Amino acid sequence: MAQDSQNIDSLFDYFYFDKERVSALTAQLFPAGVLNSVKKTSHESENGLKELKAGLPLIGVRTNSAEASARGQEQVFDSSWSLPLNLLDKLSETNRIKTNLHEAKLGDIVLIKGMMKIFDAQMVHLCMPIIKKIKLNELKSAKNNQEKNTLKQEIAGLENAEEMVKILPPTTHIDFADSFGNLSWMSVEPSNLTTTLSDVSLKYGPFIPGEWYILCIVDAYADDNKVDNPDAPYPDVTNELKRGMEPMLLMMRGLMGRPLGSFGITPLIIFRGGDNH
């Protein structure tokens, strides 16, 4: 199937588009590489009659000759938003898309459908001091000891959380529940979103309404004990510093990363619509 023609009978509303990964996959599926632009050239020609008059002493000669004039027009189209459609069609055409996470192995491409919830860690970084300030003001105006003790405990919890948040990267996370009941977790690059995170937060809060499709790569099983090759010689860390960091990394994952029982996926495209797929 040519990259400049898609078998699409509906409009897609994109929420996320990882152009670099999509381009890398598309280049492997199309021998000509990735189509970045389309150029259309058209020509129009006009024929006119030109009268030639030759004045001779006794004879008047009138000659007609055809003069052709051509006008050219060139149009260049940005085809970058055709990339996700081209990839979807080619993957579907070559039967490379799975539709159930339980049938997929690590590295497989899966198209899942369901509901999503978004979490912006950057906003937590910005909001934590503000929330703490609000609680401190409430403590100043507290009227009884019970209320004061409750607020002190909340402030202490916020301070601990604030210290933990400081070492976390300001990433954006999405939790996803698909139509088969599977849970997935993913980290997304904010620059690949088609809208700003502030707009999403102000418009929806954490839950984004509607049913969404995600074309993704499977990175981790929901069951952490499941591996594709249990006999593979995985590296055994011998460095004491690295070994000592492992419990902290697992704790950070439990607090802010992929929850237990969730698949780990890397999204390529997040969109709604396109029931033909």
Image: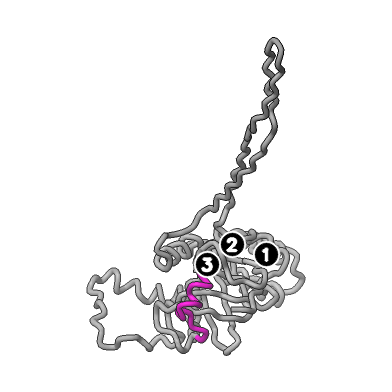
Q: Nearer the viewer, mark 3 or mark 1?
A: 3
- Contact? badges 2 and 1 (CB < 8 Å): yes
Residue at coordinates 70% horizontally, 77% vertically from top-left? 146
Q: Residue 86 bears which disc, if any?
A: 3
Where, by quadrant of the figure, is residue 182 drawn? Answer: bottom right
Q: As drawn, which residue projects farthest toward the top? A: 57
Residue at coordinates 71% horizontally, 75% vertically from top-left? 147
Neighbourhood count class around disc 1 (C-alpha, 10 Å): few under 14, some 14–19, many 20 upward: some
* Of the pair 261 and 71, the residue shown nearer to us: 71
- Magenta span covers which residues? 87-100
State yes or no: residue 157 in magenta.
no
Q: Quadrant of the C terminus?
A: bottom right
* Of the pair 121 and 165, the residue shown nearer to us: 121
Position of residue 257 in the picture relative to residue 237 (left or right): right
| Residue 256 visible from this viewpoint | no
Q: Which residue is mark 1?
A: 200
Position of residue 162 in the picture relative to residue 109 (left or right): right
Q: CA distance from mark 3 to mark 1?
A: 28 Å
Where is residue 247? Give x, y as percent. 37, 77
What's the amino acid at mark 2? Leu
State yes or no: residue 92 in magenta.
yes
Where, by quadrant of the figure, is residue 252 drawn? Answer: bottom left
The first of marks 2 and 3 along the sequence is 3
What's the amino acid at mark 3? Asn
Q: CA distance from mark 2 to mark 1?
A: 10 Å
Q: Which residue is mark 2?
A: 193
Q: Nearer the viewer, mark 2 or mark 1?
A: 2
